[in-house]
Image: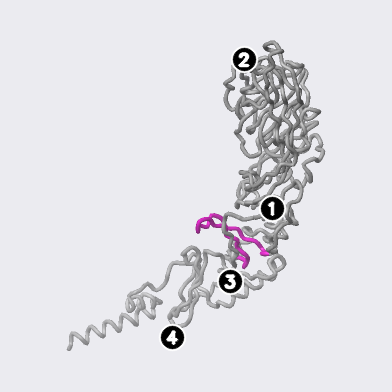
Amino acid sequence: MKKLAAVLISLAAAVLIVMFSGYKGAVQEILSGIPIHEKTLLDQRVERIGSESLPVHKIYRSGELIGVLTDEKSLRDYLRTKYNREYKADYPHGDLQLDTDMYVTSEQSYFVYENIDDQIIDYIDKNDLVSVHTTAIEFAENGNVYAVIHVSDEKLYQEAIQEYLTYFIDSNELSLLNSGKTTPELHTYGSRTVGLTILQDITVTEAYAKPAEIMTTKEEILEYLEYGDTKEKEYYTVQMYDTVAGVGAKNNGLSATQVMNINKDKIKSVDQVLSAGEELCVTYFTPVIDVVVNKESMRKEIVYAETVYVEDEELRKGVSEQRQEGVNGSKNSTYLERWINGVLVSGTLQSSVDTLLPINEIVAVGTLEIPGVGTGQFRWPVDNPRISCGWLCYWGHQAIDVQNKYDLWGNIYAADRGVVIENSYNGISGNYVYIDHNNGYISYYGHMNVRSPLEVGTIVDKGDIIGQLGMTGRATGPHTHFWIGTSYNDKLNPCDGFLDCAVIR
């Protein structure tokens, strides 16, 4: 008993000494077995230990304790005042809260902390540790979110994406599809949109974000939809005589429509006259979403007359005589086209109706050998022709660049009967062929994918395959550089009296 009494008296004396010496925290730590105070970013002391527990509010940033608020109301008042003063005009439907990496915990404590509320709020203010209530737009594919942007108003985003869609679809057709209606049936040549989809999932939610991360104008949102995070763009200075199509042909093989879309602030039509010295963007969209447009397209197509050869014993070998002139027919063809981000990726024939039957040419020959003399009537050198760069679409371009609209690497055909007089390669033309039609005309076919298998001296008939479309030499996309002439140096525009180019424009 004497030993126990001595221990109790010693413990009591120790407690009294520590309390009166200003080390109550140490006693509390001894009694409770836990630290009395976390380390704070801002210097803050524990003033005393209270007789009862009181609520305290600890404010953290990235898991680090900034300090303990004496009155949480001071923080709420600060956020409300700052919002009304600095953000309400731009974000009228929002409010302000602490940054997304910050949080406040509330707990009961016997510790009475030094009041540094003003220092804590000043720290928050100087470091701009606030976020605004706004709208988040999430882009996901296969359930995985790959991009998120914040906008000040959902209405701005809706306006921006609707304008973005009009780059790829007529605004009137877009209005019809948005209202659940269908576009009018085709009764003449042209196209109509029959479907529009975005391959990715887009979700609109409420969120908080730092003001610097929030897009507040339609133009900012449009720029992001067009180019995502791509900041570097390539520009081209317009030269004298440049056309919209010519600018595209000289820069990454862009179509005239693509050049117009990415320079919508300067170009309103693919036929617009350009001013020398003007700066145009030639970097096509690198969009954050993929817009798929399905179109139904009806156009007039040529049904080529065939040549029928009949033997005539009265004609000597190698002599030929036309007995009936060939006349091409026509048909109306309807294709289902698939476009992604304004680029045609496929076309499938849906139906075809003959509107004018062709009349075959009849040629009497002394033998069954095909003559090497042309008819003087030329055909297109490719199927499904599309002119990507016309005659003089840029300075010095004395030819037409012809693509196959639905088969970029398709066949190239002899435009008329004749004899192959040159089959070679150079750094500008790539693989090329000259045909002499032995009637005063020659024709030229450049940029073939591989060298033509036809030897010099080969007699070809109109429509014979002489090679495949390519982009060898100096070319930005698969096509054939095609011209008709009376000699190597006297080149003629195939659209001037030889081919009906208006049909395919």
Image spot of residue 92 (x, y percent)? 70, 69
Residue behind mark 2: 456
Residue 282 lies in quadrant? top right
Q: Amino acid at mark 1?
A: Thr
Asked whether the beta carbons under mark 1 and mark 2 sit within 8 Å of each other, the answer is: no
The verdict on residue 326 being magenta is no
Q: Amino acid at mark 2?
A: Val
Image spot of residue 489 (x, y percent)? 76, 17
Tell me how far mark 1 sits from mark 2, CA to CA. Answer: 48 Å
Asked whether the beta carbons under mark 2 and mark 3 sit within 8 Å of each other, the answer is: no
Residue behind mark 3: 118
Image point (73%, 51%), residue name: 186
Image spot of residue 66 (x, y percent)? 50, 67
Name which of mark 1 and mark 2 comes first in the sequence. Answer: 1
For the residue pair 320 and 38, the one nearer the viewer reads as 320
Magenta region, residue range = 130-154
Q: Image quadrant for the C terminus?
A: top right
Q: Name the element at disc 4.
A: strand
Q: Name the element at disc 2.
A: loop
Q: Name the element at disc 3.
A: helix
